[in-house]
Amino acid sequence: MSPVVLFDAALALGVLGCAALALTLRDRTGTVAAFMLTGLLVALSWLRLGAPDVALAEAAIGAGLTGALFLRGARRLGPLRARPPAPAQAAAAALGAAVLSAALLWAFATAPAESLYPPRVAAALEDSGVSNPVTAVLLNFRAWDTLLEIAVLVVALLLVMTLSPPRVIPDKLGALVQPFARIVVPVAVLVAGHLLWQGAEAPGGAFQAGAVLAGAGLALVLGGVRVDRRVLRRALTALALAGLAVFTLAALASQAVTGALLGYPDGQAKAWIIAIEGALTLSIAATLCLLFTGYGRRSAR
Amino acid sequence: MTPDLIYPAAGAGLIGLALWRLATCGDTLRRIMALNVLAVGIAMLMLAAGRETLMLAAGRETSTLAAGRDTLTRAAGQDTPQTAGAGFLQAAADPVPQAFVLTGIVVLVAVTAALMALAERLGARDGD
Amino acid sequence: MSLVATLLGTAMIAAGVGFLLFAALGLWRLPDTLSRLHALTKADTAGLALVALGAACLSDTPAALLPLGLCALLVAVSGATIGHLIARRLMRRPAA
């Protein structure tokens, strides 16, 4: 057995073990820590599966931001109170889940592998304006899906606005937090710009850049930055909605110019993609920040 | 078990684990977390399947990053840059499932935020 | 790439991994939070810096130095801050 296979097996076991801990520990903080660890290990395993774009997004969003959301919820929801299920129910559920897992794996192992997309993506990549195939799929070949995805983000934001969970007011965190933010935030902004720009030919793009930027925003919020809260939140909301607006306008403009919705004019695809991605980065960052900090008038720590 | 099935097995295991927890646990936070784990398991299966199809396109024996990129960039008439550590990083996966999974991750965090807001609202009503 | 750089890089990565292993061991075996924190922050920062240095020796291009340096810097800064926050919390609430 080669060392690489051993590494893969250890990593897969680590992922499963951490997920099991996340879903069974009774201590809330421990649960969230195990969940974030699962996210990081999953990102590593996706790197091994040849998907660095997705690994970046999972590390930043799946492990980082979702973990932050869970931590907020863990504090607000209080300790675990649920009763354990009846043994018969637990056993039946375990049996059902195990059978389903085994069936999935069996289907995966026996299904005929057919290579449909890669040759077509490779053939069309030259005209897409970018050389990172994932960015080409996201913002050119299937830009429609991405437009609707941004719409989903806006809907989630509207829902959070309506529910108005208490705003996040950070504890006083002591002397080191401000120097931390002073170093990390500028670096995060630079990294986000780099990720956005290199997304055209290497792993990266609007989602990863937006997530990093949102992380910087959370560092500022938790560091207790003093800004006029109402003005700031209005600006962020406007920014969050602007992404969808720009994307929709671009779709309509491309319809007017080329006769195809989100079919970019010949030779200008890269400019269109970078413009849309720039707007999306800022809007995704603002949306993710607002989803975390909340809208409510009441406040809680 | 063959090495190709390690990650699919992990994905299937995550799905089973998440479904088991969804069926047996009544706690809201845990159920939302189980939903996240379920999504990760499905994404893992999709990415593993995507790698399989790309290997098929590239020819079974060429399984390095350079060779994987090569398949995608050769048609585009570009040179493939030599990457350090190419033996460790696997062939680039099929970009279409990658794009799906990327979309899924972003939608999932939005859904999680909305669900947490709902749960906190419900918790406030139930509790105090 | 010269043989010296390869050897040096491999040795540094091995040393870094050793540091990280000891940090994990300390986290597992040490009795209370403060001593665990002691093991974690110091060994973690040094271990990752060593791994980054080793990787820099192994890389062919000078361009790889920037992200590696950034990684080490970010881990050092966040490690110090988080260590401070945990310790501060502990001091405020000695009962917990």
Image (cartoon, coloured by chain):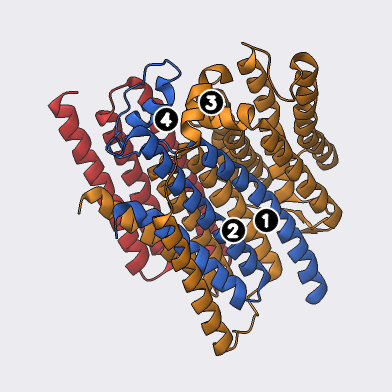
Check disc 3 and give the amino acid type: His
Q: Secondary structure at mark 1?
A: helix
Q: Nearer the viewer, residue A1 or C18?
A: A1
Chain ID for orange: A
Query: Label 3: few (<14), some or many (≥20) within 10 Å?
Result: some
Where is A3 relative to C6, above or below?
below
Could you say which disc has been placed on residue B112 in the image? 1
Q: Nearer the viewer, mark 1 or mark 4?
A: 1
Q: Secondary structure at mark 3?
A: helix
Q: Nearer the viewer, residue B53 or B38?
A: B53
Check disc 2 and give the amino acid type: Asn
- Mark 4 vs mark 3: tell me if same chain: no
The quarter in which the N terminus of chain C is drawn is top left
Read off the residue under disc 3: A194
Q: Nearer the viewer, residue A21 or A73?
A: A21
Q: Are marks 1 and 2 in contact (CB under 8 Å)?
A: yes
* Residue A170 position in % (x across, y down): 69, 53
Q: Nearer the viewer, mark 4 or mark 3?
A: 3
Chain ID for blue: B
Query: Label 2: few (<14), some or many (≥20) within 10 Å?
Result: many
Residue occupying the point 54% across, 37% down: B96
Read off the residue under disc 2: B36
Where is C26 relative to A55, above or below?
below
- First-in-chain label (1 vs 2): 2
